[in-house]
Amino acid sequence: MTKKSKPIIELKDVWKTYKMGEQEVHALRGLNLQVRSGEFLAIMGTSGSGKSTALNHIGALDIPTKGNIYLDGVDIATLTESQLAQIRAKKIGFIFQQFNLIPTLTAHENVTLPLIFQDVPEEERNARANELLELVGLSERKHHLPSELSGGQQQRVAIARALATKPEVILADEPTGNLDTKTGDTVMDFLKKLHREEKRTIIMVTHDEETAQHADRVEYLRDGQIQEKKSR
């Protein structure tokens, strides 16, 4: 990433308020955040800090109570659910802590699933899945179900699935949270490789300081607001 790279995501005074009976709970409190194209950003925070809520808003899974969220200059807070779904499908790849693989589908079938929803021809989606599973080192396991894979292998399948649609932005929610230290390091090394060699924009939320240090920049979230910034 260079200093001249343009912002691909920008949050301006974003609030998220939930009503619980007569009480209002503010998960985000005027959050301001800018992410440049090709950047690897880690958002750190303890449980309840608002980091997962922030990631859901960046990923167009939720819309703010007030404020603006720009993705490639488009304010996604003003879009319909159908338009948000299109953005999620084409521009954003998600990597979840729980992997979220379909248990009855093989690794190969899990990776092709997003491409089926986009009406990609069968030959093309099979070729893409084979390419991605080779990229994550799982070509020999492509016909295995998630239950037949280790946690680290399942996470690598999830990464391959996130890359299937060639998204501009990859969002990772505690990607090492369910992995042992060695496997977690392997997954983080792979994410860094994606960032370094393919210039992917990666936004990761984590509560773990050591995991966060793999990123170019770390933002600290507390009570729904950025508290401290560290660049490396």
Image (cartoon, rainbow, N blue to C red):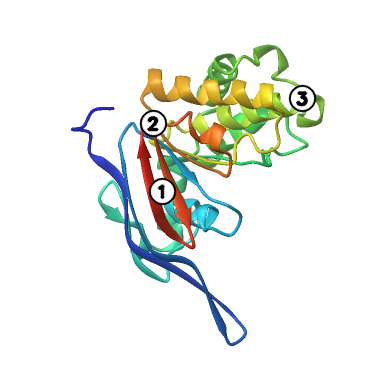
Identify the residue under disc 2.
Answer: 216
Left-right relation of 27 to 40: right
Q: Estimate the x, y position of residue 210 in percent, counting from the top left.
A: 55, 32
Regarding residue 108, the answer to whether it shows in the image is no
Q: Residue furthest right?
A: 148
Query: Label 1 amino acid?
Result: Ile
Farthest residue toward the bottom? 22
Q: Secondary structure at mark 2?
A: loop
- Against 37, residue 142 (above or below) is above
Q: Secondary structure at mark 1?
A: helix
Quadrant, the C terminus = top left
Residue highlighted by disc 3: 149
Q: Which tag, 3 or 1, sits closer to the chain's start? A: 1
Residue where numbered disc 1 is placed: 87
122 or 231, which is in the foreground?
A: 231
Residue 207 left/right relative to 183: left
Q: Residue at x 57, y 30 (%)?
A: 159
For mark 3, give the secondary structure. loop
Within 10 angstroms of label 2, few (less than 14), some, or many (20 or more) residues?
A: some
Residue drawn at x 81%, y 30% as measured from the top left = 147
Q: Nearer the viewer, residue 28 or 155?
A: 28
Query: Closer to the N terminus: mark 1 or mark 2?
Result: 1
Q: What numbered label is drawn on residue 96?
A: none
Residue situated in front as seen by the camera: 42 or 56: 42
Residue 161 placement: quadrant: top right
The image quadrant where one finds the N terminus is top left
Residue 144: x percent and y percent? 76, 22
Q: Examine the rendering and report whether any part of residue 49 can be seen.
A: yes
Q: Are marks 3 and 1 in contact (CB under 8 Å)?
A: no
The 10 Å Cα crowd at callout 3, few under 14, some 14 to 19, many 20 or more, is some
Distance of mark 3 from mark 1, alpha carbons?
31 Å
Closer to the eye: label 1 or 2: 2
